[in-house]
Image (spheres, grey):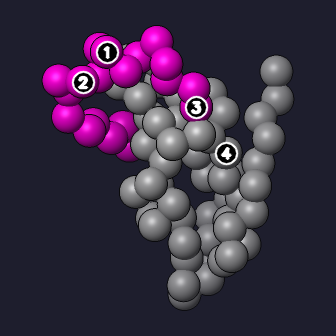
Amino acid sequence: MSRTYGSLECGCYVSCEGGGGLLTDCESKNCKFEEYSNKHWPCKICGECFLCGNHTNCLEDLKDMGRVRVG
């Protein structure tokens, strides 16, 4: 299975599929990857992006958990 990557304003290619990540290093002085990664963090239960994924089955388990970023 291959990931689908999207492009940020600065030119970085990112993906939320399968844990996501950055495809290339950014050479822009205004890199947007940190901003992106602050919004797109992995679900502690299923590992998919909390913002982009479907977490219907995870919501009850996540109710008492805090936000945990893997990085």
Q: Which mark is residue 15?
A: 4
Where residue 33 appears, as percent x and y from the top left, is 53, 64
Would residue 47 be found to the left or right of residue 21 on screen? left
Q: Earlier in the sequence, mark 2 or mark 4?
A: 4
**What distance separates the C-alpha of mark 3 from that of mark 4?**
12 Å
* Residue 3 counted in the magenta span: no
Mark 2 surroundings within 10 Å by alpha-carbon count, few (fewer than 14), some (14 through 19), many (20 or more): few
Q: Earlier in the sequence, mark 3 or mark 4?
A: 4
Q: Earlier in the sequence, mark 2 or mark 3?
A: 3
Residue located beneath label 3 in the image: 53
Where residue 44 appears, as percent x and y from the top left, is 35, 24
Q: Earlier in the sequence, mark 1 or mark 4?
A: 4
Q: Which mark is residue 63?
A: 2
**What distance separates the C-alpha of mark 1 from that of mark 4?**
26 Å
**What distance separates the C-alpha of mark 2 from that of mark 4?**
26 Å
Amino acid, disc 3: Gly
Contact, mark 1 vs mark 2 (Cβ under 8 Å): yes
Mark 1 surroundings within 10 Å by alpha-carbon count, few (fewer than 14), some (14 through 19), many (20 or more): few
